[in-house]
Image (cartoon, grey):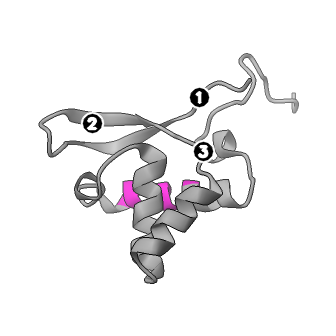
């Protein structure tokens, strides 16, 4: 089983609950998460916010505190997840510990 990935914020913030947030675990979403977001809104931007918040395990209020750069990357992670691409590569992490660059 692959190691759990985390989302590291470039600009940490204090959450609504008073907790300093600098990293968040990334949860793979399911079809039921999309269905739940669609039941709340038909607006694609709002739906994307709901899914990003679910993926990172935070509230919409906390998502609203993200710096624009962190927000952009979180959206990219969601889109890459939906496209079944390698999230570790997007986040700049090796999938296998000790992997080295093949070009010498």
Asked which quadrant contains residue 43, the reply is bottom left
Query: Vertical placement of 79 versus 16: above or below?
Result: below
Give the SS element for disc 1.
loop
Mark closer to the observer (3, 1): 3
Left or right for 104, reference 60: right
Q: Earlier in the sequence, mark 1 or mark 2?
A: 1
Left or right for 58, reference 5: left
Give the SS element for disc 3.
loop
Write down the region rendered in magenta: 69-77
Asked which quadrant contains residue 65, the reply is bottom left
Please identify the residue farthest to the left as the structure is shown. 18
Name the residue located 39 percent from the left edge and 59 percent from the top edge: 71
Q: Which residue is mark 2?
A: 21
Q: Which residue is mark 3?
A: 28
Left or right for 79, reference 6: right
Disc 3 to disc 2: CB gap under 8 Å: no
Please identify the residue farthest to the top as the structure is shown. 98
Helix, strand or loop: magenta stretch: helix
Query: Vertical placement of 61 versus 12: above or below?
Result: below
Instruction: Return the residue nearer the eye: 69 or 38.
Output: 38
Query: Vertical placement of 103 versus 91: above or below?
Result: above
Instruction: Return the residue nearer the eye: 39 or 91.
Output: 39
Q: Is residue 72 visible?
A: no
Rendered location of residue 88, percent (x, y): 65, 39
Disc 3 to disc 1, C-alpha distance = 10 Å
Name the residue located 64 percent from the left edge and 59 percent from the top edge: 31
Q: Which mark is residue 4?
A: 1
Give the SS element for disc 2.
strand
Instruction: Return the residue nearer the eye: 11 or 66.
Output: 66
């Amino acid at each position: 089983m692959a190691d759990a990935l985390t989302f590291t914020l470039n600009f940490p913030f204090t959450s609504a609950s008073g907790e300093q947030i600098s990293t968040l675990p990334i949860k793979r979403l399911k079809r039921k998460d999309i269905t739940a977001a669609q039941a709340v809104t038909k607006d694609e931007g709002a739906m994307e916010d709901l899914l990003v918040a679910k993926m990172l395990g935070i509230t919409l209020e906390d998502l609203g505190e993200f710096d624009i750069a962190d927000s952009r990357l979180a959206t990219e992670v969601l889109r890459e997840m939906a496209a079944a691409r390698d999230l570790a590569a997007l986040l700049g992490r090796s999938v296998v510990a000790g992997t080295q660059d093949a070009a010498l």
